[in-house]
Image (tube, rainbow, N blue to C red):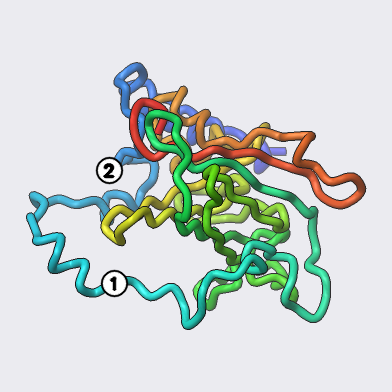
Amino acid sequence: MAAAAERGASQREITAEIASIAAQYRGSGETQPRLNYPPYRSSALRHPQSPFVRVDPEELERCSPCFGDRDVDPKDADLTAGHAGEPIGERIVVAGRLLDQAGRPIAGQLIEIWQANAAGRYNHQRDQHPAPLDPNFTGVGRCLTQADGTYRFLTIKPGPYPWRNHHNAWRPAHIHFSVFGTAFTQRLVTQMYFPGDPLFGLDPIYQSVVDPVARQRLIASYDHDLTQPEYATGYRWDIVLAGGHA
């Protein structure tokens, strides 16, 4: 009983610390993650501490990124296929539109995603979480947006996973998104979350977006029209690249 009470007190302290930091910036209009956010402890080591260096963008663009040795195939957007068997977990459809700040669709853009499997483990050698790997799920996919800016992925709903930021720290279930734009220097990397996750209030990465309205835009919405009968549930998440709704 004493140990359980101690763990409960520790969780309350973590929640209070995150809430206290967020309260300092509430209403500040900060819609992007803070580069140095004390509850997210490794941000102290990762955020830039020197003035940015101006570089020649044309010189950078001479070394273009390599996305693979073949063109993007429509099958690349199905993360449940391409293996000997079916992956384990809840099938989901994730779809939406890529838009500019005026709400106009952006076509022909490369979107890549990566995620943990249903047990909350990445198929990566540095992931030491003692959860099972799924031999039928690698957790990576890509597609090009259509003429109306739409994208669509079929995948498995990822599980939460522990990380060592603080005592008993767990990340909410999420999918990483990368949008490349028209140049590598325009690349956007962000995360999409699922509605109703009980870990939101305990996660400093999610809370590092201190504007509560902006945080809400990181959460997909359940979409019954996307849901496929007896096969997969659907989630809709639009991506706005600039402006007040980015």
x, y percentage for residue 145?
Answer: 53, 52
Q: Residue at x 72, y 38 (%)?
A: 1
Residue at which label 2 appears: 36
Residue 9 at x, y = what percent? 57, 33
- Quarter location, residue 79: bottom right
Disc 2: CA contacts within 10 A as few (<14), some (14-19) or many (>=20): some
Farthest residue, direction top: 27
The answer to whether residue 39 is above or below residue 214 is below
Front position in the image: 137 or 178: 178
* Quarter of the view holding residue 81: bottom right
Query: With respect to residue 73, does 170 lie above or below?
Result: above
Which sits earlier in the primary sequence, circle 1 or circle 2?
2
SS at badge 1: loop
Indicate which label's residue lies in the foreground, 1 or 2. Answer: 1
Q: How many labels does the image show?
A: 2
Question: Three-letter amino acid code at disc 2?
Answer: Asn
The residue that appears at 60% across and 70% down in the rendered structure is 73
Q: Is mark 2 on a helix, strand or loop?
A: loop
Q: Do the residues labelled 1 and 2 touch (CB within 8 Å)?
A: no
Residue 168 can be seen, yes or no = no
Q: Mark 1 points at which residue?
A: 64
Residue 208 lies, in percent from the top left, at: 39, 37
Q: How far apart are marks 1 and 2 (CA)?
A: 30 Å
Circle 1: residue type: Ser
As drawn, is 207 to the left or to the right of 94?
left
